[in-house]
Image (cartoon, grey):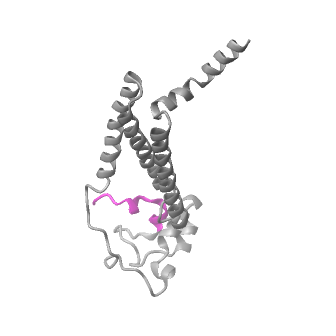
Amino acid sequence: MAFNAVSRAPAFRSLMLSSGKFASRSMPTAAILQQRMSIQTARPLLFKATAPKALFGDNVPNPATVPQPAPNRMKGSYHWMNERALTVISAPLLVTAFAYGAHPINDMLMGIVIPMHAYMGFGQVLLDYFEARRWPVISRVLKYALVAITGLSMFGCWRINTTDVGLTNYFARIWNANKNKQAASEQSD
């Protein structure tokens, strides 16, 4: 006789005949299972015993008629490749900025690559925590806000690069602001 997990369960032993088959062909009701099994194992069985007709009425969905998207094994790989490409591009840009200092082409490329890298990273955070299926309105609002913030940050980088000192010198000023403030206060004393 092959191993049967149901026949080994203590709650089902009283329902079985000596041949190992159920006494009746119908499954026991949820009430009978609840009486014979402990509370810890009865609750999952109550959910399993719920018929789809009890949940949906006469409009029981047929899984065969639900439209399924075409299988595509490359679906998530393009996004991953784009994120990695931006990461690989941003590394030499930052090294160049540290090694050679400010250069207009490097500053302009950083003004594009760094906001796009942030956009893709925060987009994944929104995708993970605010699924469109579960939070349709909030998800859409946050996606539009992310696009607007990314556009504004790109515009800000462009303004810094064209009308001010450039991104590299701008961040150098921010980095050294405290040192410059201390040096100015020492000179005044």
Q: Position of residue 63 (x, y in %)?
A: 35, 76
Q: Indicate whether residue 123 is drawn in magenta.
A: no
9 shown above or below 90: below
In this rendered view, identify the residue nearer to me: 175 or 132. 175
Q: Is residue 175 left or right of residue 5?
A: right
54 shown above or below 89: below
Q: Identify which residue is drawn at 53% across, 73% down.
A: 30
Give the quadrant of the C terminus: top right
Q: What secondary structure is the stretch in magenta mostly built from? A: helix
Q: In this view, does 82 lie to the left or right of 149?
A: left
Q: Identify which residue is drawn at 55% across, 62% down.
A: 138
* In the image, farthest residue toward the bottom: 58
* In the image, farthest residue toward the right: 189
| Residue range highlighted in magenta | 1-14
Give the quadrant of the N terminus: bottom left
Q: In this view, does 163 lie to the left or right of 103?
A: right
Q: Where is residue 120 in the image (x, y as percent from the top left)?
A: 42, 48
Q: Indicate whether residue 12 is drawn in magenta.
A: yes
In this rendered view, identify the residue nearer to me: 83 or 156. 156
In this rendered view, identify the residue nearer to me: 111 or 160. 160
Number of numbered callouts drawn: 0
- The image quadrant of residue 60 is bottom left
In this rendered view, identify the residue nearer to me: 59 or 51. 59
Q: Where is residue 6 in the image (x, y as percent from the top left)?
A: 40, 63
Q: Is residue 62 left or right of residue 35?
A: left
24 shown above or below 103: below
* In the image, farthest residue toward the front: 163
Q: Identify which residue is drawn at 39% across, 30% down.
A: 94
